Image (cartoon, helix red, strand yellow):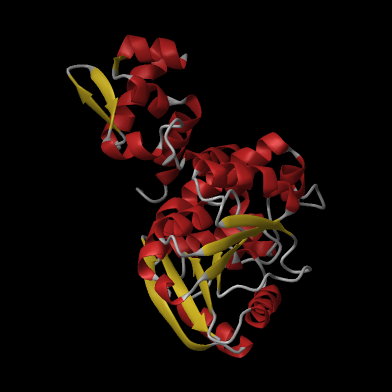
Amino acid sequence: MQVGLGFWASKTLLSAVELGVFSTLANAPADLPTLQRKLVLHQRSARDFLDALVALELLERENGIYSNTADTDLFLDRAKPSYIGGLLEMANARLYGFWGSLTEALRTGELQNESKGGGEDPFAALYADPKRLRGFLSAMSGVSSVAAHALAAKFPWRDYKTFMDLGSAQGMVPATLAHAHPHLMGIGFDLPPVKPVFEEFIAHRGVEDRVRFQGGNFFEDPLPKVDVIVMGHILHDWDLAQKKVLLGKVFDALPKGGSVVVYDAIIDDDRRKNAFGLLMSLNMLIETPGGFDYTGEDCRAWMRKAGFSNVRVEPLVGVDSMVIGLK
């Protein structure tokens, strides 16, 4: 029953993010009438909604005064750089509805988003709209922030001088790596419309002297020559043939002694424990023509086939693991 009705709690959180509950309470704790007025909630719903968030341990309530928990204050206040709610906003606006067609996707193997039935490619439309693109790239930064810090700490960067983040979005990973390791020079590689958002973010982080943007399509254009190529939450977007092509291009671009680092919500080899990774693979079914998530052994085999040696899987953070290969 808890799993089957899990969308109750999910939609309550997503609506709270949409309404700005956590950002409002980050400014100051408040009582029920104040929140009802600020959030424009109907009298019938306000108390149950806010108390449901308390019961879900997303808010605290003391003597009738509501406040954020430590986690929601850190991660769901739009004013903080640690905000990860952009992804939840996207889930609320897009994925929540599309997942209602999961049964159809399971029977047909076809995506269920805006492109369904030959409709418009949602990502082409996204990249053509600067405002929507900025919001999407910010959401990707929120998703990548914790993984970027773990990557900075767990990979032996002292052995390398240059790196590239393939599909860099706003630049969270390059900025974090450059900040943590002052000897590194980095490149963010993404589609050309990302450039102004990337450069603004990198300048704000104060590493513009060591991190630059390069625009291109990583399937069609040559890749820059660097010591390490990072692919975070990228490989799962593509079908098997595309995955292999991309790993082959990365191998060709690296020098002897160079490394590739791939990280995703990598599924455990026995396919029993990482439920998030398996559900993410179903999300790729909903969102892409052929994308899927994969086990560590899957990725190791693809890397070895591309020519990499000493391929290993290491935990990164949370549900994410990284697969490292040496040329």
Q: Residue furthest right?
A: 118
- Residue at the (65%, 63%) spot, across then down: 107
Whether residue 74 is visible, yes or no, is yes
Percent coordinates x, y for residue 120 in the rendering: 80, 47
* Residue at the farthest left position: 63
- Residue 228 in the image: above or below residue 86: below
Quarter of the image with the C terminus is: bottom right
Residue 292: name its quadrant: bottom right
Judge by depth and name the residue closer to the eye, 215 or 289: 215
Q: How many marks?
A: 0
Q: Residue 65, position in %: x, y?
A: 24, 18
Measured as percent of width and height from the top left, residue 299 is found at 53, 79
Pick the front one: 150 or 76 = 150
Q: Please tell me which residue lies in front, 239 or 141.
A: 141
- Coordinates of residue 288 in the picture (x, y in percent): 67, 59
Q: Is residue 58 left or right of residue 170?
A: left
Residue placed at 67% from the left, 81% from the top? Answer: 248
- Whether residue 5 can be seen here: no
Q: Quadrant of residue 53?
A: top left
Taking the spot 60% from the left edge, 68% from the top edge, the residue there is: 235
Q: Is residue 287 left or right of residue 185?
A: right
Note whether 269 is above or below 201 in the view shown.
Answer: below
**Residue 52 or 107: which is nearer the viewer?**
52
